[in-house]
Image (cartoon, rainbow, N blue to C red):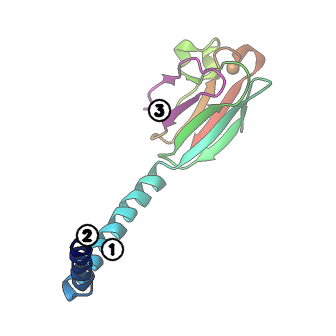
Amino acid sequence: MLRILLTGASALILVVGCQGGGESVDASATATTRFREGMDGLQGGIERGMPATVTMIDGSRFEPAQVTVPVGTTAVWRNSSAVSHTVTADPARAMTASNVQLPTGAEPFESETLPSGQTFVRQLTVAGEYRYVCRIHEGSGMVGIITVE
Ligand SMILES: [Cu+2]
């Protein structure tokens, strides 16, 4: 038992001794550099795809109904109301096609029907004005605009 404890203590001293060495400091500096490079990469990704949230609220409204975001923003629609909604940015799927407009070159898109608590995410990579609707409540004026610039 005592023998085992002594062996353990010797091993511990050896480890501590290594960490005090010059090599160990170099390794630590390299690790720090790698960590910084990783964080820079992550930060770039966050800036390019920074999220902006539009909440679907009771009373069948998008909140904010109109918002301006930088190009590359990841739009997040969150249904915080009690009923289901859609995010419909496809003129072919809207009740009134003219309620939906997309910048030239942007692909039309539509979420599934989103029950209470669900979210829909879409990165907006083409600059311009996105006019979209909730297909279920379009008739009662549930329309939104995101300007990407
Ligand atoms: Cu709706």
Name the amino acid type tagged 1. Answer: Thr
Using the image as rendered, state which of residue 15 and residue 70 is in the foreground.
Answer: 15
Say which element carries label 1: helix
Q: In this view, does 36 lie to the left or right of 67?
A: left
Say which element carries label 2: loop
The x and y percentages for residue 84 are 66, 18
The x and y percentages for residue 66 are 69, 38
Most extreme residue toward the top is 95
Q: Is residue 20 left or right of residue 134?
A: left
Say which element carries label 3: loop
**The quarter of the displayed image where residue 132 is located:** top right
Name the amino acid type tagged 2. Answer: Met
Tag shown at residue 32: 1
Q: Report the residue marked by disc 3.
A: 104
Q: In which quarter of the image is the N terminus?
A: bottom left
- Is residue 94 located in the magenta-colored stretch of the structure? no
Most extreme residue toward the front is 1
Q: Which region is colored magenta?
A: 104-123
The answer to whether residue 110 is above or below residue 119 is: above
- Of pointers 2 and 1, the one earlier in the residue sequence: 2
Q: Are marks 2 and 3 in contact (CB under 8 Å)?
A: no
Q: Report the residue marked by disc 2.
A: 1
- Structural crowding at the residue carrying mark 1, measured as other residues with C-alpha within 10 Å and reported as few (<14), some (14–19) or many (≥20): few
- Structural crowding at the residue carrying mark 3, measured as other residues with C-alpha within 10 Å and reported as few (<14), some (14–19) or many (≥20): few
